[in-house]
Amino acid sequence: MEPMTARPTTVAPLSLAELAALTSSVADDVSAGLHEVHADEENRWHVRLRCDDQVDVWLISWTQEQGTQLHDHGGSSGAFTVVSGELSEAVWTPGAEVLRETSRSAGDAVLFGEHYVHDVRNVRPEVAVSVHAYSPPLSQMNYYDVDGHQLTRLASVWTDDPEAPAPDLRAAS
C-alpha cells in the first residue's frame, strides 16, 4: 500500500481576496435561503457546496458548545464568513506565542494563510452558521496543543473534510 500524499494540482490556488469574496457571496446566498441549513445537537452539521481542483466550499452549522480542536489546514489557505450567530475563534499568534480569542459575528470574514492555527466554537445558545473555503482544496489537517508558550503538534490527518472527527488527541498528548 502506497502512502497517501497531498493532491497534486496544476491549478493556481485562489488568493485570500478571492477566497473572501467567495465566502461572502455564498454567505449572501445562504442568507437569501438558496441553501438549506440544518442544526444537529450531537455533531456539527456540514455540507460541501463546491469542490474542484482549485477550492472547497463548505456550509457549517454550530450549536452551543460545538467547536473544533486547535488545528491548521495542512497547506491550504482559507477564509470563512459568519452567516448568522456568533463564533469564538482562538488564534495562535506566532511571536507572542499565545492564543488570542476573538468574537466573530454575522458578516465577519476571516482570511488565513497556510500556517494559520486556530480553534473555532460556538459558546452562545443561538445556532451559528458559517461558510468556509479552502484553496487548494483541503487534503490534510494538523492538530495542536499549547504547552506553556509552545505550540506542539499532536497529530496530522489526511482528509478532505474539515468536519471529519479529529483523532483522539488525549491519547497522543
Image: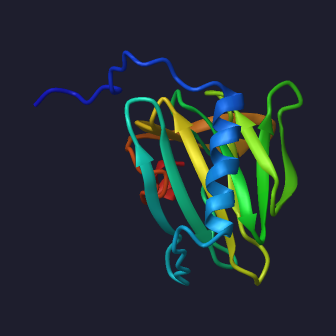
The chosen color scheme is rainbow
Up-down relation of residue 4 to residue 155 (above or below): above
Q: Is residue 74 visible?
A: yes
Image quadrant in which you'd find residue 99: top right
Q: Residue at x 65, y 31 (%)?
A: 18
Q: Which residue is drawn at 54% across and 74% down?
A: 37
Up-down relation of residue 48 to residue 125 (above or below): above
Image quadrant in which you'd find residue 94: top right
- Residue 79 appears at what percent x and percent y? 66, 41
The mark tally for this picture is 0
Q: Can residue 70 be seen in this view?
A: no
- Residue 96 appears at what percent x and percent y? 89, 30
Which quadrant is home to the N terminus?
Answer: top left
Image quadrant in which you'd find residue 62: bottom right
- Residue 142 appears at what percent x and percent y? 52, 39
- Residue 166 appears at what percent x and percent y? 46, 55
Q: In this view, does 158 lie to the left or right of 44?
A: left
Up-down relation of residue 109 to residue 36 (above or below): above
Q: Residue at x 48, y 29 (%)?
A: 136
Q: Looking at the image, which is closer to me, 139 or 91?
A: 139
